[in-house]
Image (cartoon, rainbow, N blue to C red):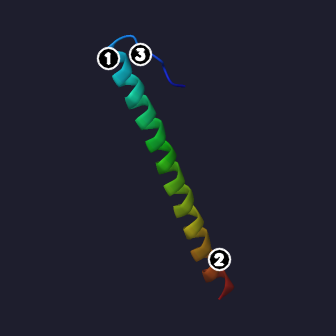
Amino acid sequence: MINEQLITDEGSCQLIIGEFITSNNKKMALKKITKHRNNNKKMNVKNKK
């Protein structure tokens, strides 16, 4: 949830930082998911042999 505190400069900075953090968290989550999928593929290859 984003706090909309645009009344002061400090508030707008907080809003921007909040947006930045949420977008970074999404990117990190996606990286973890793709890493996990790649590990599963490797496991499947090992199991087939």
Q: CA distance from mark 2 to mark 3?
A: 51 Å
Q: Position of residue 17 (x, y in %)?
A: 38, 30
Residue where numbered disc 3 is placed: 6
Residue where numbered disc 2 is placed: 44
Q: Position of residue 33 (x, y in %)?
A: 56, 57
Q: Residue at x 61, y 82 (%)?
A: 46
The amino acid type found where label 3 is placed reads Leu
* Left or right: where 31 falls relative to 17: right
| Kind of element beneath mark 3 | loop
Most foreground residue, 38 or 12: 12
Q: CA distance from mark 1 to mark 2?
A: 51 Å
- 2 vs 35: above or below: above
Question: 10 Å neighbourhood of mark 3: few (<14), some, or many (≥20)?
Answer: few
Residue 39 occupies which quadrant of the picture? bottom right
Disc 1 and disc 3 in contact, CB within 8 angstroms: no
* Left or right: where 4 falls relative to 16: right
**The N terminus - image quarter:** top right
Question: 10 Å neighbourhood of mark 2: few (<14), some, or many (≥20)?
Answer: few
Marked residue nearer the N-terminal end (2 or 3): 3
Question: 10 Å neighbourhood of mark 1: few (<14), some, or many (≥20)?
Answer: few
Marked residue nearer the N-terminal end (1 or 2): 1
Most foreground residue, 46 or 23: 23
User: Which circle marks residue 10 in the picture?
Assistant: 1
Residue 41 occupies which quadrant of the picture? bottom right
Residue 45 occupies which quadrant of the picture? bottom right
Disc 2 and disc 3 in contact, CB within 8 angstroms: no
Q: Position of residue 37 (x, y in %)?
A: 59, 65
Disc 1 and disc 2 in contact, CB within 8 angstroms: no
The amino acid type found where label 1 is placed reads Glu
Taking the view exactly as shown, the residue that stands out farthest to the right is: 48
